[in-house]
Image: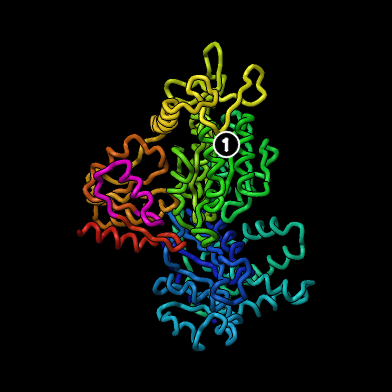
């Protein structure tokens, strides 16, 4: 019997792979994302890990997901799914609320038995009716059984055979989206190169999944997704953590300063350390130390010795590093501190995303301790902002905190490897820039207020710096009251002056808009899509998204003062909104705050912004 296939042409589509932690959903989603990028789609991904290391199999708390949004103009990983691959009932239940009407659900019927339904807390034997999923097209496939049959006679134990079922699901989805298997075959061969039996098994199951879609007599929807003509160059599917690592390396190369990372593993920042450890051939020195305090202190030592020094962490680690960061402020040493924000407080939600560390980054140290704070807006933007954080640190001899978050750190996009000649040069403000006769550690550039950095051991530049207050002129320890006031003012003035050296705030949309949406950091993609959809519908909305937070861009007040209605959207209880009001009193600011550990939903943003327009 010839199958009936409905081919849908779409501009963009959202697919979510979901199952137990051991079902291989992250690998499945990654391969499919790479395939889509190679065939001309823009992509944005969202790996959604369970908070527990190994929850009981088949339970709601153990569901692992990987969402990919692909099309021809993609800003984020998407809201509701057009296609859900649910490897068990728990995956179906967790993702049911995020399914579009008339979406497609692929299930493994072997994992939807009575016991499986009970584990997922279903009370009936019809999970679709129980969840109210009446408009969706369900593709029920005995994936586990077919995988076992596919690998009969192969020298693999039964557990290893079953583990390959994610490749059957991938093959079926590749057929649904007209993705040839050649590239996937190459990726799998490379991944399991040291285990030929696994290469053979995965390629066999992948092909059988594809053929099942082609030969089944079930009515299935198939999709053609619009592609784009991409700029020629070398591309990489990069996540935010990897892009951050590459940005540090680029800054090291451009500045001529060796890169040092002192770090302690913490979710979701650990992959920055993992990436840099692999790149010793580029002169990178990356060490895993015994705790968070040691991480930042080794970096401060490396900075004193003349390196581009960095440390990576998440919210709890930033709290532990606070005292040492204060030392870097007082000693005036260049330092890049990367905070990949996650759900808190305390251990909180280690695998989920938030923007709740902003005030900790701005003020989380004792004393008047001004610091530069910047934020990345997307996975690929992590490269640019790591580069900028390094540039500011080296040219203004100050610590810089770079805020990313779990969403963009783990999420990925297709990234064109950039031409570094197009990036602004980095000229460290070291003793080579000093033109006077006799150098002292306390000497400053009259324009930037930055002191002249001398690496330890440099002949003729012996000096001491530390955490005690120092005399403005001599650099010797001082407890004089008037001098302390002067030094407090100088350290703040140095940070304020950096506004003269950073890009101005850019506006998306017209200055005549009826509403200005303000955001910062990793919410950019969702805010940008919401604003563009509203403008396409005839509403007049603009977006101002901040990469530079302390100091703010020089034109911030000029732009914000043009709008009668401003709404600040952020994944905390209003930290940036409060900061803006502190810096620019009198702004008419409303707030949209959500702290759920999940990204914004574009549909929710549009509803909130539309309501604000109507007020």
Percent across and percent down for residue 266 are 60, 54
Query: Along the line of sight, which residue is nearer the eye, 529 or 431?
Result: 431
Asked if residue 42 lies left or right of residue 612, the reply is right
State the image quarter where residue 466 is shown: top right
Q: Residue at x 60, y 80 (%)?
A: 111
Query: Along the line of sight, which residue is nearer the eye, 434 or 369?
Result: 369
Task: Classify the position of the C terminus by image quarter.
Answer: bottom left
Asked if residue 476 lies left or right of residue 145, the reply is left
- Tell me, yes or no, if residue 35 can be seen here: yes
123 w.r.t. 449: above or below? below
Q: Residue at x 63, y 35 (%)?
A: 301
Percent across and percent down for residue 489 are 40, 30
What kind of element bears circle 1? Answer: helix
177 w.r.t. 322: above or below? below
Task: Classify the position of the N terminus by image quarter.
Answer: bottom right
Q: Residue at x 72, y 74 (%)?
A: 159
Q: Residue furthest right?
A: 155
Query: Along the line of sight, which residue is nearer the eye, 248 or 144?
Result: 248
- Tell me, yes or no, if residue 381 can be seen here: no
Percent across and percent down for residue 193 are 74, 57
448 w.r.t. 80: above or below? above
Q: Report which residue position mark 1 lands on.
A: 250
**Is residue 320 magenta-colored?**
no
State the image quarter where residue 195 is shown: bottom right
Q: Residues within 10 Å of mark 1 (few under 14, many from 20)?
A: many
Percent across and percent down for residue 236 are 57, 48
State the image quarter where residue 297 is shown: top right
Q: Residue furthest top?
A: 437
Please name the colour scheme applied to the rendered image.
rainbow
Which range of residues does the magenta coloring cover? 569-590
């Amino acid at each position: 019997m010839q199958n009936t296939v409905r081919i849908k042409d779409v501009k963009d589509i959202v697919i979510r792979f979901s199952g137990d932690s051991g079902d291989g959903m992250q690998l499945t989603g990654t391969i499919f994302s790479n395939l889509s990028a190679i065939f001309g789609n823009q992509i944005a991904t969202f790996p959604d890990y369970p908070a527990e290391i190994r929850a009981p199999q088949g339970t709601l708390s153990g569901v692992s997901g990987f969402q990919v949004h692909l099309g021809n103009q993609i800003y984020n990983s998407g809201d509701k799914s057009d296609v859900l691959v649910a490897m068990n009932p728990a995956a179906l239940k967790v993702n049911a609320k995020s399914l579009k009407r008339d979406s497609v659900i692929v299930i493994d019927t072997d994992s939807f038995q009575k016991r499986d339904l009970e584990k997922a807390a279903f009370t009936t034997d019809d999970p679709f009716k129980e969840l109210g999923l009446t408009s969706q097209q369900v593709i029920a496939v005995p994936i586990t059984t077919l995988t076992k049959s596919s690998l009969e006679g192969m020298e693999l134990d039964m557990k290893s055979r079953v583990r390959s079922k994610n490749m059957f699901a991938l093959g079926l989805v590749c057929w649904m989206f007209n993705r040839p298997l050649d590239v996937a075959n190459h990726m799998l061969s490379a991944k399991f190169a040291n285990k030929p039996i696994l290469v053979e098994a995965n390629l066999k199951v992948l092909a059988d999944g594809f053929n099942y879609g082609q030969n089944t007599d079930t009515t299935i929807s198939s999709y053609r997704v619009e592609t784009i003509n991409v700029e020629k160059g070398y591309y990489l599917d990069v996540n935010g953590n990897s892009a951050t690592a590459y940005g540090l390396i680029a800054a090291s190369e451009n500045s001529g300063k060796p890169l040092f990372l002192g770090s302690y593993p913490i979710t979701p920042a650990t992959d920055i350390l993992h990436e840099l450890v692999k790149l010793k051939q580029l002169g990178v020195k990356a060490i895993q130390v015994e705790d968070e305090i040691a991480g930042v202190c080794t970096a401060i030592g490396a900075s004193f010795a003349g390196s581009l020094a960095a440390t990576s962490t998440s919210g709890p680690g930033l709290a532990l590093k606070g005292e040492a960061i204060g030392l870097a402020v007082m000693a005036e040493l260049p330092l890049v501190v990367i905070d990949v924000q996650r759900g808190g407080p305390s251990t909180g939600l280690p695998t989920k995303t938030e923007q709740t560390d902003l005030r900790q980054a701005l003020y989380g140290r004792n004393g008047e301790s001004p610091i530069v704070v910047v934020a990345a807006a997307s996975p690929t933007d992590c490269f640019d902002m790591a580069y900028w954080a390094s540039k500011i640190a080296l040219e203004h001899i100050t610590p810089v905190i770079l805020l990313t978050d779990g969403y963009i750190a783990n999420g990925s996009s297709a990234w064109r490897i950039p031409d570094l000649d197009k990036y602004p040069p980095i000229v460290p403000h070291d003793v080579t820039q000093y033109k006077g006769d006799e150098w002292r550690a306390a000497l400053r550039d009259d324009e930037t207020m930055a002191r002249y950095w001398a690496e330890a051991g440099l002949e003729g530049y012996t000096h001491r710096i530390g955490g005690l207050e120092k005399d403005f002129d001599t650099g010797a320890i001082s407890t004089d009251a008037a001098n302390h006031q002067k030094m407090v003012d100088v350290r703040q003035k140095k940070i304020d002056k950096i506004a003269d050296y950073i890009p101005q705030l850019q506006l998306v949309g017209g200055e005549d808009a009826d509403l200005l949406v303000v955001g910062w950091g990793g919410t950019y993609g969702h805010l940008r899509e919401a604003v563009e959809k509203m403008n396409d519908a005839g509403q007049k909305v603009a977006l101002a998204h901040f990469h530079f937070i302390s100091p703010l861009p020089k034109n911030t007040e000029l732009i914000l003062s043009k709008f009668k209605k401003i709404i600040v959207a952020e994944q905390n209880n209003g930290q940036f909104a409060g900061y803006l009001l502190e810096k620019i009193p009198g702004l008419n600011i409303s707030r949209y705050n959500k702290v759920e550990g999940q990204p914004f939903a574009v549909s929710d943003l549009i509803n909130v912004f539309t309501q604000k327009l109507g007020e």
